[in-house]
Image (spheres, grey):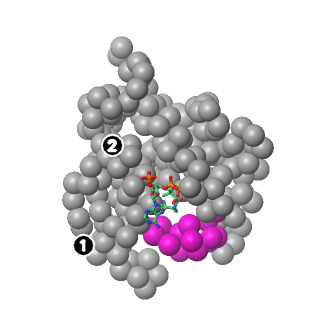
Amino acid sequence: MAGFEQLMLGTPRLLLRPLADGDAAALMAIFSDPAVTRYWSAPPWTHLDAAHAMIERDRRAVADGDYLRLALERHEDRALIGTCTLFALNPQSRRAELGYVLSSREWGRGFMHEALLALLDHGFGALALNRVEADIDPRNQASARSLQRLGFAQEGYLRERWIVGDEVSDTALYGLLRRDWLARRPGPAPSTPAS
Ligand SMILES: CC(C)(COP(=O)(O)OP(=O)(O)OC[C@H]1O[C@@H](n2cnc3c(N)ncnc32)[C@H](O)[C@@H]1OP(=O)(O)O)[C@@H](O)C(=O)NCCC(=O)NCCS
């Protein structure tokens, strides 16, 4: 896939943009919070090196179009409050997986819903995806509700799919099709490269 370096998406309260060097401290604050990583696929970060490594990994991946992670930067104060990602991109099947994380200080204010509306519009529009999947811990009710509100349906239940530290956990697999998205979203259809 083409690179995503120049990609920026705007929402009423947020700028979605690739990670930058100055984001390490804000990422560390988010990913070192055990409340945030409770149902995450990795334990909380304990060292700033992990933040620098994520930024460096993203620089290469975003340039190569391997995955698309965008920071949620709030217009009001330019604070980085979370990230959202389309990854495991499969060009042949026009499929990707969705991931997202928000600072616990910002939960309950609709920021992630706003960001994911823009990211999914871009995914089903410019990226011409046909299907987006999300793999979540079935106990993660805030995440499940967030997906349901966007129109995702639970399609599967995979037992003991993750082992993080000593904890074994299951997966609830959610899916959203392009035609479901187009049927639900308000306003004109997002433009695809072919349209
Ligand atoms: C998932 C996440 C982004 C959701 O963001 P948020 O700002 O908390 O979302 P909201 O407050 O709008 O909550 C979403 C819905 O879940 C509900 N909810 C929130 N916490 C809940 C809980 N503990 N139990 C049940 N429902 C809950 C809310 O009422 C809301 O429902 P509604 O849409 O019907 O009003 C955020 O919780 C987060 O970053 N969690 C940590 C990272 C994570 O788990 N990411 C997903 C991994 S795949």
Magenta-colored span: 30-45
**Is any part of residue 59 visible from this angle?**
no
Q: For the residues carrying marks 2 and 1, which lies nearer the camera in this image?
A: 2
Residue located 59% across and 33% down the image: 11
Tell me the element at label 2.
loop
Taking depth in this image into account, of 70 and 147 the one nearest to the observer is 147
Q: Residue furthest top?
A: 195
- Asked if the residue at label 2 sits under 8 Å from ligand 1, the reply is no
Taking depth in this image into account, of 23 and 37 the one nearest to the observer is 37
Find disc 2 in the rendering and name its residue: 151
Quadrant showing the N terminus: top left
For badge 1, the amino acid type reads Arg
Which SS does the magenta portion mostly show? loop
Q: Is residue 31 magenta?
A: yes
Q: Which mark is residue 159?
A: 1
Taking depth in this image into account, of 33 and 46 the one nearest to the observer is 33
Residue located 26% across and 54% down the image: 154
Residue located 66% across and 61% down the image: 105
